[in-house]
Amino acid sequence: MKIILSLILITLFISCNSGNKTVDEKIMNNTILTNEEKNNEFMKLSTRQKEEIRIALNALLKRDNFDAFIIIREQNTNKFIQFAVNEGGLFFDLPSNQLNDNQLNIAKKILSPYQILFAVQKAYDPDDNTKIVGEFGGFSKKINNDLDQAIEIIEKIITQVFDVNGEINLVIDKN
């Protein structure tokens, strides 16, 4: 009888103490986080990463060659976001060929409030610009010089679309 009573008390204690824990408590206790908790609390770009992106975007805006661009790549997933300068402002591009169907749908939801919509374009033969050789799609839009918005979009894509497991490792490539 004592054993049964002890088991009941242990069960009650565990159930009372396993209720709504904060994300910090779950991390400390090595408890599994839900995807929503990962995206909302755990998976963020660091202040250092945001500053590196800001510096790279500012430098891009100051370049005067027509083919200037940067690529922000997450090393764990090898997925990337591109920026170029177009008519004095930043031009955002997220190619869709690197995304699976689920990631594509998430990207559509995340980018639509910014009026960045998915579009498919025809690919032409470089030797015969009248011959269509395929299609390519993606999300592209001129976002002017709003670096805060650019960084916000980058963070949402990396943390919610790219399915990063663990630490976010960014590489910024410039031409």
Image (cartoon, rainbow, N blue to C red):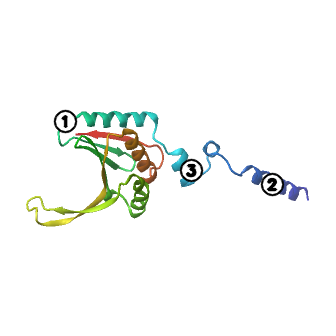
**Label 2, label 3: how far apart the Cα atoms are:** 26 Å
Q: Which residue is mark 1?
A: 64
Q: Which sits in the foreground, 19 or 63? A: 63
First reached walking from the N terminus: tag 2 or tag 1: 2
User: Residue 15: image x %, image y %?
Assistant: 75, 54
Q: Which mark is in front, 1 or 3?
A: 1
- The kind of secondary structure element at disc 2 is helix
User: Residue 102: image x %, image y %?
Assistant: 43, 62
**Label 2, label 1: how far apart the Cα atoms are:** 68 Å
Q: Which sits in the foreground, 107 or 11? A: 107
Residue at 83% over, 57% down: 8
Work out which quarter of the rendered image holds the N terminus and state it: bottom right
Q: Which sits in the foreground, 88 or 171? A: 88
Mark 2 surroundings: few (<14), some (14-19) or many (≥20) residues within 10 A: few
Mark 1 surroundings: few (<14), some (14-19) or many (≥20) residues within 10 A: few
Q: Residue furthest right?
A: 1
First reached walking from the N terminus: tag 1 or tag 3: 3
The type of residue carrying mark 3 is Glu
Mark 3 surroundings: few (<14), some (14-19) or many (≥20) residues within 10 A: few
User: Residue 89: image x %, image y %?
Assistant: 27, 42
Q: Which mark is in front, 2 or 1?
A: 1
**Label 1, label 3: how far apart the Cα atoms are:** 42 Å
Q: Are marks 2 and 1 in contact (CB under 8 Å)?
A: no
Q: Which residue is mark 2?
A: 12
